[in-house]
Every structure is written in structure tokens, then in C-alpha cells.
Amino acid sequence: MDFEPNSEQQMLIDQVRRYVREEIIPLEAKLDPDASELAPEDHARLVEKTKAMGLFGIDIPKEFGGPDIDIVTRTLLAIEMAQHRAGLYVPCYGTFGGAGLAQIFEANDDQKERYLYPTLRGEKKAFFGLTEPSGGSDPARAIQTKAERKDNGWVLNGAKIFISNADRAQYGIVFARTDASKGRAGITCFIVDSDTPGFHVRRVVHTLRSSHYATELEFKDCWVSDHQVLGEVNKGFAVANDRLTRQRIPYAAGCIGVAIAAHEMAIEWAKMRSTFGEKLANRQAVQWMLVDNEIDIRTARHFTLEAAEKARQGIPFRTEAAIAKLTASEGGGRVVDRAMQIHGGMGMTKDLPLERWYREMRIRRVGEGPSEVQRMVIAREILGSNLR
Amino acid sequence: MSIRLRLDKPWRPLAAEEIARLPGQLGIYQIADAKGAILYIGQAGARSPFGLRSELQRELAERGAGCQFRVEVNMQYRSRWFELLMVHKADHGALPPDNAKNPPPNLGRLSPA
């Protein structure tokens, strides 16, 4: 496979790179170092720019009015969009628009009218409610939120944790157990409006990431009608699993983008900074750190584009997505760590974005399936799917 | 186990000698009137030269005497600040008056137990 961008991809990459450097990074100089939102007037102005670039709504499929961008190109652009202080979790502060959750494209016509189209118009936001206090790595077994049949609908009881955007969303996609005897074949996916009685956002969950926080949810006798079932009853796990696999590619791309930005900073610093009468760049200890950075970045980039290419071709990419997520999140973490080491004391300060990337990158080894689960996925491929 | 949702430390007078004892660390703070009604919830972020001390000195200069304050040192000052604003709104039906004049964009909602 050839992963060099073609001329059209390169043009888009250059356009987005210029946008990040000329529009996003200068604004960040005035924001709190942990901020994850722009002033409304700046956001609105930049949205007009991405619309003019023809890239607004970048994740919206063409048939719904989005730009016609394949997943390989999207991955290349995601690498560019992450190359600023807030870029790992809020690439370009959302100025390229959102498509909402991928699952909602699978909704029936009525649900599309009520949820998908308002989301694409920017009128509604959604959250993805999968992880529970009982665990997130093994949703098939860990989901304890129950949905029980009542009055042409379902009553939800349970809790979710580490859920982003639930406090700001108008609805969410929530996974609950509808048949306790069937394991992964007993999970159903529901669309829950945020104003449904019995739905509560209980608290902010404070983590290393100090903005773009997660929340804890409670469902207490929360009744939803049959019209809120997304897909089929007891087939929700497939909906969740498909997202978890597909999501690993842009997740990996974000890690690569931040790693590239940290690496570029380290190279600049090493060329400029002298110790004991010698540039850091002339010291083998520093050179080797930069070489290891380069190798980590190239490795992650190769595997991530390989996964994206297979996804584009419509061939199975589960193992490739796991390898991409693993190499990018672990390698990216190492790159940022080395960049901090090369910067010395300055690398620890909030004057530079490195400390934010360091904290946020650590989460990436756990989020969207921890490294150990990715290795399990890869091991199954190597050793056979019956391996337990 | 979760951290306390609400800040319930005792109020201290907003006065120069009290503020001088504050750390230069990052965190959040609340300003109240003499009766303890919260007027403002603020944050001391990384752009504050001496963190909480700088922010409270600025508050004193702007408000003068007669107010009270309390602080919480917290490296997660952004998410804690959003949380305290949302909890206040849930408890009182509105933001503190001085936050309501310039509310943060896209503030979420909580229904704390």
C-alpha cells in the first residue's frame, strides 16, 4: 500500500495546516491553557472560513450534504487538525462541524427527522452512553443498566460514567440490558432525550483532562417509548461494537497529530538551546530521543493509514484499527514525554502545550479501549477467534 | 468515592491581609456578600501571575471591602469551575449575579443528588 498523499489530498492537507497555524494557534495564545472552547464570535467567524473551504460538516456523508471525503483523506486531515494545544480532544475547536454520532445514521425515518437532521443542522447535540461504573472495556458483560418492558416502552434504571457532553446534549444514545440471560445478545440501544423524567447528569468526573470533561449519569425509572429503540431490541451490542472499531482510526490520528507537533517543538528547541557550550541537537542523547520520536510517529502513521485504507476498501479492518490505536496512543505518549525531557524545566510549564498533551495523551491509552484490549483483539487474530 | 460537589469551607473576609496568606496556586474561588450570598464564582487559571492570590487581589481592588471569599486549590480548575457554576444553577435556578452578566458559552446542566 502506498500511503503518500496524492495531489488532491496534499492540497487539502496544506489548506488545513495553514488554517491551524494562521487561525487556531494565534487565538490559543489568548485563551486559558486548558480551554476547550473559543469565544462565540471567534467560533462563528471560523465556521464561515471552514464553510468557504468546503470542509464544514467534514464527517457528514455525501448523501446527507457533507463534503465527499474518504476515510483515508479524513485521517490525513485529522492528523493536521490535532496539531495545536487543544487539538487532541477538541481539534480546531469544532469549527469543522460535527456529524453527531455515527449510529444515528442507522436510525429509522422517524428518528432521523427527530434526531439526525436537527443534529446535522447544528440544533441538537448528542452523547454516547456506554461505559458504566462496572467497567467499560468489556461492555457486553459490564452493562448493568437495565431496561424493562412497561406500557409500550421501556423503563431504564442504572448509571453511566465517563460520558462526554451529556450535560450539554439534547439527547443521547444509551445502551441497556434488555435480556439478562443473553450476554451481548441481550443489549439494546435507546435514544434518550435529556429532558426525559428520570434522566440525571449527576456530576462532573474530574480527570487529568481538565476541560472537555466527562460526566456521571443516573437513570431512575426513566421511561422511554418503543419509538426510542435504535435498531432492533437485543441487537445493540453490534451498534456499539461497530462504533468502537471505526472510532479507533480518528482516535489514532489525533494522537499522531499531537506527536508531530511535540516532535517539531523538540527539534526546534534542540537546535536552539545550548548546554555546556554545545547545542542540544549535537548531543547523542538528544539525537536518539528525536530518532525514537521519528520512528514512533512513522510507525503509528503507517498503521493508522493502513487501517483507514482497508476501511475505505470495505475489507475487515478490526485488527488494523487495534494496531493503529495501540501504536498511536502508546507511541504518541512516548513522543510527548521525550519532547518534555528535551525542553527541560520549560517542558513542565503551562507556558507550553506539552504538559497538557502529556496529561491528555495518558488518557488515550485507556479511552476507546485500553492498550490491553487492543492487544487482546490482535492476539485473537493471530491465535484464532476461539482463544479465551 | 467522589470529591465534594459543593464548596462548603468557612467564608473569610475579602481583605488584603487575608489574601496575602493565599497560595499562588491554581484553583477556584467564590465571592459572597456580607450575608454569605454567592455573588461570583471565579477561577485562577495559568495566566494569573500568582494564581488565587492575584485573582483575589483583583477582586478586592474592584469590589472594595464588605465581601467574603473562599478558595479551593485545584489543578483541574476548569472542570471544577464549570461544575460549581452548574451546581449553583441547579441549586438556585440561576447563575450567581456577577457570572450571569458574562456567562461561559455552552454551560451544561447538572442535577446533583
Image (spheres, rainbow, N blue to C red):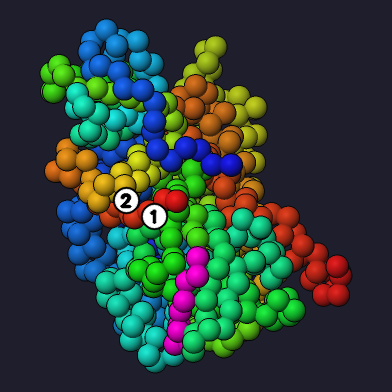
Range of the magenta residues? Answer: A219-228
Residue at 58% of width from left, 61% of height from top? A131
The dot on residue B111 is: 1
CA–CA distance in space, label 2 to label 1: 6 Å
The residue carrying mark 2 is: B90
Q: Nearer the viewer, residue A326 or B59?
A: B59
Is residue A221 within the magenta segment?
yes
Q: Are marks 2 and 1 in contact (CB under 8 Å)?
A: yes
| Tag 1: amino acid | Ser
Quarter of the image for the N terminus of chain A: give it: bottom right
Q: Are marks 2 and 1 on the same chain?
A: yes
> Does B83 sit above or below residue A15?
above
> Does B77 sit above or below residue A184?
above
Is residue A7 within the magenta segment?
no
Chain under disc 2: B
> Does A94 sit above or below residue B62?
below
- Residue A340 position, x and y percent, is 53, 31
